[in-house]
Image (cartoon, rainbow, N blue to C red):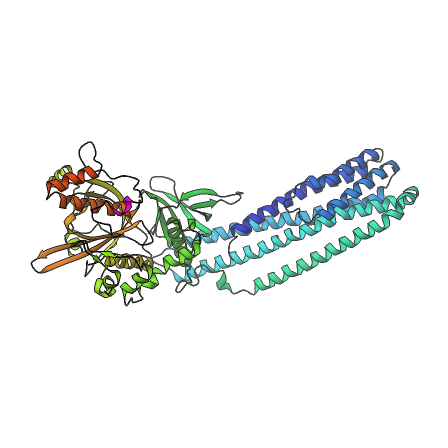
Amino acid sequence: LFFLSLKTRSLLSVFEEDAGTLTEYTNQLLQAMQRVYGAQNEMCLATQQLSKQLLAYEKQHFALGKGDEEVISTLHYFSKVVDELNILHSELAKQLADTMVLPIIQFREKDLTEVSTLKDLFGLASNEHDASMAKYSRLPKRKENEKLKAEVAKEVANARRKQHLSSLQYYCALNALQYRKRVAMMEPMLGYTRGQINFFKKGAEMFSKRMDSFLSSVSDMVQSIQGELEAEAEKMRISQQDLIAVNESVYTPDSDVTSPVINRNLIQKAGYLNLRNKTGLVTTTWERLYFFTQGGNLMCQPRGAVAGGLIQDLDNCSVMAVDCEDRRYCFQITTPTGKAGITLQAESRKEYEEWICAINNISRQIYLTDNPEAAAIKLNQTALQAVTPITSLGKKYEVQHPSQTVKNMENDKIIPSDSAGIQDSTQLIAPGTPIQFDIVLPAMEFLDQNRGGRRANPFGESEDSSKDDEQDALLQQMFVVQFLGSMAVQSDATCEVIYEAMRQVLAARAIHNIFRMTESHLMVTSKNLRLIDPQTQVTRASFELSTVTQFAVHQENRRLIGFVIHLSETPGEESMSAYVFESNTEGEKICYAISLGKEIIEAQKDPEALAQLMRSVPLTNDGKFMLLNDVSEEDGTMHEGGEESEA
């Protein structure tokens, strides 16, 4: 309601282009008529030019030329009449001045000038609105002056009302111009033709009989167009009256700040945002621009531009709220490499949260699915599922995968899904278990919440033993992952605990609008799992591979992977934690690497088994196991005789 939508902006540019083309054509037509009026001795040449100009209407390529077929055919006929009347040259000074030149001059001076004036008024109103919005955007967040805020908000509302009213008047004039141009093109020719017939007796004898019916039909067509114009003008007057009666709160920004209606399922968004630009080492400026999403791209269309330009590729990006220069509703888009991108400011809480949700949905490439709206709704329904008790996780899993079985990683026994799914979700994860969304923690807090995780040296120095272990390991495979969350669990008997942990972590992120993820390099070796900072190469956490009791990928999103760490702290006391990650590649590859590492651990106990394993898996030049980049469908479920991934 407040701003021009992308479609309206495009239509407005088309209407303005049409008005400019019409102005140019009208001036040319007027020049041709004035030549007929003023050049008595060159009447023949002037009428020839007029005939050509009438035919040129069809070749003007009006952006809104649809529906002008009658005008074009009528002008074609008039062109023939002008050619025939050219041989009946005579002086028609007064008649031509009153019936031919005057109407087109009135059309140019009244209608076209009115459109130009309303365009300038609309531009001034838009500038006033931008100035008031800039003043409103600079209101401080911490120490709000309610009186000042109310004054500025009222100023914004008045500016918006003025802009809206001027825009409607401008649109009304542009719409009316489409009707008036038809009348303006034909009415002068009626006067010209009738003046010629009445003035020349010979002309009347030649054309009166066959022209009477034609002129009558043209008059009827003009009256019909006039009637359509009056009906359209009446509709616009009613719209303007409705606008005047609208409550001021409609124009007040952030009027529903306490309980805005937020659509979290958006896969495309458009509107005005403030863009932060650095003008120096410590100085910045904010520019109010029109932004819109197109597929996986964030586009920006400056005022006056015909089309928008690419600002940011949103695929695999992250978006988060930031505090910036004491401004409200600011958020930042971060590139997939972790580099800080652009900083934007919305005008209200509703716009602020909808932009964050829309960018987050687009970054997950939901727009590429067959039904993006349904995928976005399903993604955000995770929040509702998180607060809905699941009485039997096994029943839910059995309905989705009735023929699938669950494998116990410790005793290598196949358990039917109906018996494996008996556990309730509360038996897997205790209700109210806290979720850790950032893996970088103080040492004591990290050890308390995720038992057994090894804290990295704060000075960026790795232990020498970890390097030696890396060199001696038979398997080394690096994966790029994003940490989603971790939480304590009560059971590691089946991979259902990983699915439940994934569900709760994703639901909590959706509920609390947490979109930032910590990127790490997951190093899988034949001895341990290590999470490495990609920038400093510092080990954030390390887990012995023997403590990994379960690992699996999500049933639908194959990029989600999780594993359970089982540690024995003191005699009779154990702790289990589930870790959830999003991988840049298929999660099955990570599961395959973990399974291969556990196979190597078991095979090292028997030299013959290790030799057989080394013959079945490709090796690198330095004698380490090599994972294939492209795993065939047969090998995707692990090599024969090896442990199978929980995926």
412 is within the stretch colored magenta: no
The front one of 284 and 19 is: 19
Residue 202 at x, y percent in the picture:
92, 42
Residue 286 at x, y percent in the picture:
41, 46
Is residue 66 at all visible to an observer of this figure? Answer: yes
Q: Indicate left or right for 366 with 76 as reference.
A: left
Residue at 42% from the left image edge and 51% from the top image edge: 369
625 is within the stretch colored magenta: yes
The front one of 167 and 148 is: 167
Residue 283 at x, y percent in the picture:
36, 42
Q: Is 508 situated above or below 312?
A: below
The front one of 553 and 306 is: 553
Residue 557 at x, y percent in the picture:
33, 52
The front one of 370 and 383 is: 370
Q: Which residues are magenta?
A: 624-645
Q: Give the tally of numbered discs.
A: 0
Magenta stretch, main secondary structure, is: loop
Is residue 429 at all visible to an observer of this figure? Answer: no
Q: Indicate left or right for 620 with 380 as reference.
A: left
Q: Indicate left or right for 298 with 549 as reference.
A: right
